[in-house]
Image (cartoon, helix red, strand yellow):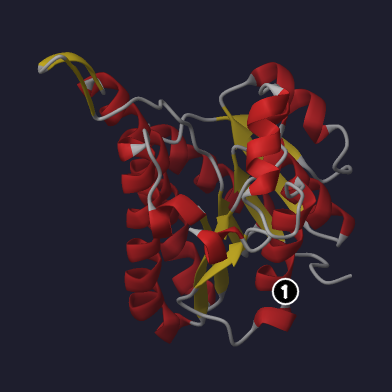
Amino acid sequence: MRLQGKVALITGGAAGIGKATAQVFAREGAKVVICDVSDALGNEVVKTLGPDALFYKVDVTNRTEVQQWVDDVVARFGRVDVLVNNAGITRDAQFVKMKDGELVKQMSEEAFDLVISVNLKGVFNCTQAVAPYMIKQNSGVILNASSVVGLYGNFGQTNYVATKAAVIGMTKVWARELGRYNIRVNAVAPGFIMTEMVAKMPEEVLAGMRAKTPLGRLGEPEDIANTYLWLASDEGAYVHGTTISVDGGIVLGT
């Protein structure tokens, strides 16, 4: 098993890509610790992850909660080997919308700040909490969730795109700063993935997504989870400071 005995922390692990990643890591021998803001979903998922798995209710925007989570995990297991910064949200809206020369709608400051707080500050908080432990043990893997929209932009997603582009930037900085301690840092940029949220979209929207993807289908959460697995394992030992697009080729037509 490729992650035998490794302690892996996964944020947003109660659903979607986070849930799939937790299940794949557990199957490969990792001691999986997930966090999420949903008690109900988190407690249900952790039952599928084996006897060593743990769930914590954590708001990644709250540095105190994050630090307590990481400290407790290290107190229990003695180390932390992998961090997957998966937690994220969307609050889509057009930047500004005009009609007949007048402003009729725009992305709210609240929507912008919330997405920045979860998707960007959350990644900062969690990584800064685990980094000292990884430095002390002279090993670790940090994996950050970006998106193809962070590379190419997307209509109506100023806030989300800003965070996903910034995550790529932070990945490159941390790769430079932490590589000397044998800590590998990489990002994954998913395309259209059939998560629980996406599955609820109208069929015409899903058809449009498939039409834009050269492989002709949406990705499954396991497609991303398997990429995280490869990067977290010894098979990805010389991959560092990069962003891997897992998108069915969608960037080719962007």
| In-front residue for pair 41/97 | 97
Q: Residue sitting at 64 percent across and 64 percent down?
A: 249
| Type of amino acid under label 1 | Ser
Q: Is residue 132 left or right of residue 18?
A: left
| In-front residue for pair 118/107 | 107
Q: Position of residue 7 (x, y in %)?
A: 69, 58
Q: Residue sitting at 36 percent across and 50 percent down?
A: 124
Q: Which residue is tagged 1?
A: 233
Q: Position of residue 164 (x, y in %)?
A: 40, 51
Q: Residue sitting at 72 percent across and 71 percent down?
A: 230
Please tell me whether mark 1 sits on a helix, a strand or a loop: loop
> Residue 35's quadrant in the figure?
top right
> Residue 100's quadrant in the figure?
top left
Q: Is residue 123 left or right of residue 134?
A: left
Q: Position of residue 192 (x, y in %)?
A: 63, 46
Q: Is residue 146 visible?
A: no
Q: In the rendered view, would you say 131 is above or below 48?
A: below
| In-front residue for pair 107/10 | 107
